[in-house]
Image: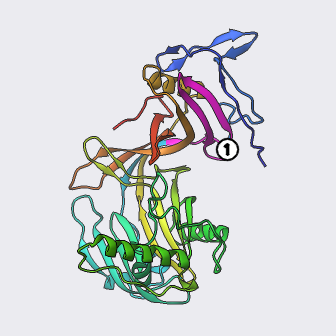
Amino acid sequence: MRKQGRIFLLLLAFLTLAGCGAEQKETGGEKETGISVETEENGWAGIANGDMVEVPISEGVMLKAQVEMPEEGMEGIQTLHVRMDGFPAETYREAFGIQEPVEEWAYREGFGFEPEKVYNYSGEAGTGEERMPATLALGTDVYFSTKKWEDKYAGNYPVYSVNGLRDPWEEAVTNADLEFMDREEAIAAGREFLTEELGIEDARILQAISMRHEDMQKIQQNTIREEQELGYNIKSPTTMDDWSKEDDAYLLVYEQIFHGLPIVSYPLVRSDDFYIPGGTVELGLTVRGVERIQQSWSLEVLESRDEELLPLEEIIGALEKKYGMTLAGGLTLDTMKLVYYPYPTAVDPDAPYEFDLYPVWQFEYKKDEYGSDFVYINAVDGMEIVG
């Protein structure tokens, strides 16, 4: 098993950039790059998954992050050219225990960038012993929910965002083990369902939220009180449900792994307003089984190209170039994660969208008290990706 070393990268001199590379000096038979590295591993740039990198970037900007990269290293990382594809209806029929054959489902012909058929099933379903009324929509994304989940949790549970939980949910949810299954077992069960039943390559947990029935009851009580106190003119005011331990649930948010890397986990809106969905899968799990799935990104690989990733000092040089001429005091880049960044190449409204998936270093920093922001550096050419 790999030891997790801690790396301290101390910037001894500013890197002199030549083109997109960093100048190196020969001293005593070893190359001196201006960065010293101490590690027990000899992975990419002497770094392995889970190691810490700590180096000043410029005055007031610090990189202090745990590296997230493939456990097996950087061999085989590719740039991919992909096309959005439809989701296999038969796979989802079997996964959700739907007895009606796909041919009997309601559907419409897809148009524009959609798959050939867009399905909308409504009827009995269940991944456990109990069958329940449910809906399943299959198009450019997937939405599955039981009626019980919709009735109990829609509007009452915290929605995942890349910047954390949104108020007022922060104080109401916990990381507790629930009676029907402990938290780690739930995470493993959700991952198994996504990979074994839905055919996702792999899924890595981002957020696991324990929704205890007593907390959900308090949220609903608070919502009713606020509606009454503020005098909202609501046609359908919130009414109180009966809550019991049978309503305990986990809300599990995973990032999809595609060809070895996670796809950027939250939606992107480009400067031209083109919307790119996030790479997360949201799964709701109860004592009755999987009761909710929300998923995007069914992709067909059209072309692939093996890539050699830039060494660490050139990635740091790219960050220096970005922040060297800016006043960004007190900023700490606290995550460093290798992801696939989808860049649209064909957005014909009458054909499936196509993207290049670039291997990119994603750096995160706390923007303000309300959330975080990101910097993306192409791992192949060192260019920042913006807009």
Asked whether, in this view, residue 137 is left or right of residue 69, the answer is left
Disc 1 marks a residue whose amino acid type is Gly
Number of on-image labels: 1
Task: Classify 100 as above or below 330.
Answer: below
Q: Where is residue 92 in the image (x, y as percent from the top left)?
A: 44, 75
Q: Position of residue 365 (x, y in %)?
A: 50, 39
Could you tell me which residue is drawn at 47 percent across and 34 percent down? Answer: 378
Q: Which colour scheme is used?
A: rainbow
Front in this rendered view, residue 113 or 208:
208
Mark 1, residue position: 50
The magenta-colored residue range is 50-78
Quarter of the rendering occupied by the C terminus = top left
Asked whether, in this view, residue 94 is left or right of residue 40, the answer is left
Q: Position of residue 325 (x, y in %)?
A: 43, 19
Q: How crowded is mark 1: few (under 14 residues within 10 Å), some or many (20 or more)?
A: some
Asked if residue 44 can be seen in this view, the reply is no
Magenta run includes residue 341: no
